[in-house]
Image (spheres, rainbow, N blue to C red):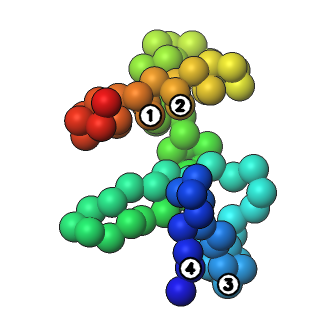
Amino acid sequence: MHKVTTKRQVTLPQAVCQAMALQPGDYVEVFARDGVAYIVKMNSGNIAGKFNHLLKGNEFPSSEGMKKAIKIRAADKILANGNL
């Protein structure tokens, strides 16, 4: 059993990281459905899909563009859940 910290962080067990081939610096998507939390490793194709609205026929966004898109996506999720 794992305890959630005050910052809502949880350490993933080594066996889970190995099974998912997760490495430091990898991106994951975390979401809940029917009371169950899911962690999905994002590959570059998945990440490109998440930032599709930034591409608009251009190349994959810079790291600054990615950070901005992540903030926008997080804000959209918060607003959609009525947590603001």
Of mark 3 and mark 2, the one earlier in the sequence is 3
**Residue type highlighted by circle 4:** His
Find out whether the residues at labels 1 and 2 contact each other: C-beta distance under 8 Å: yes
Mark 3 crowd level (few <14, some 14–19, many ≥20, 10 Å Cα): few
| Residue 74, label in figure | 1
Image quadrant assignment for residue 47: top right
Residue that label 2 marks: 70
Q: Nearer the viewer, residue 35 or 38?
A: 35
Alpha carbons under labels 2 and 4: distance apart: 26 Å
| Residue 15, label in figure | 3
Image quadrant assignment for residue 10: bottom right
Alpha carbons under labels 3 and 2: distance apart: 28 Å
Counting from the top left corner in percent of width and height, residue 83 is at 30, 37
- Taking the image as shown, residue 74 lies to the left or right of residue 21, namely left
Above or below — where is 27 with respect to 82?
Answer: below
Residue that label 4 marks: 2
